[in-house]
Amino acid sequence: MDRKCERKPVNPMQHRPRRILAAIAILGAVGLSGCAWWNGNDEREIRNRLSHVTTAVEVADTDETRRYAASEIAIAREKLASARHAANAEDFALADRLISESLVNVQLATAKAEMLRSRAQLKDMKTSPPPEGTRGEGRPQQ
């Protein structure tokens, strides 16, 4: 039987969560590496990390994330606000710890939202009837 290679249409939104996860992973690596070498007196580095984590929270805070991981993204925002408060009070060690905790919660929220969205899509695929002209395994009838 001769099978032709057919290309499936690509949904541009399909790759968006991967891009978000990649951006958060990169920011996470940068943010957590800051914990390992921070010497306790570099206010500028803390302000930089605050800026990076603020961006990560804003990127991750989508309708989908609020739908599937509302508590995790809310905790990330609370930790970020506490980190800002600590930095303004010049408690940079506390700010550093809270920045890291916020970033971990952003990563958790994003991963949880992606997992639950995928589960919902799989459930929809299992419950919906197969497309017309197929035998249920996704190939056209001969």
Image (spheres, rainbow, N blue to C red):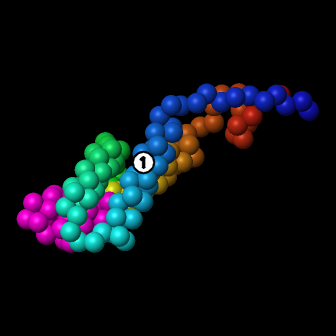
In the foreground, 86 or 117 = 86
Answer left or right for 74 relative to 34: left
Percent position of residue 10, x then y: 58, 30
Q: Residue at x 9, y 60 (%)?
A: 88
Secondary element at tag 1: helix
Q: Magenta residues, as a range?
A: 78-105
In the foreground, 108 or 89 = 89
Q: Residue at x 11, y 66 (%)?
A: 90
Residue 48 in view in this figure: yes
Residue 102 drawn in magenta: yes
The residue beneath circle 1 is 23
Percent position of residue 14, x then y: 51, 38
Q: In this view, does 39 lie above or below 5?
A: below
Residue 105 in view in this figure: no
Answer left or right for 76 relative to 2: left
- Please tell me whether the stretch drawn in magenta is mainly helix, strand or loop: helix
Residue type for callout 1: Ala
Extreme-right residue of the structure: 1
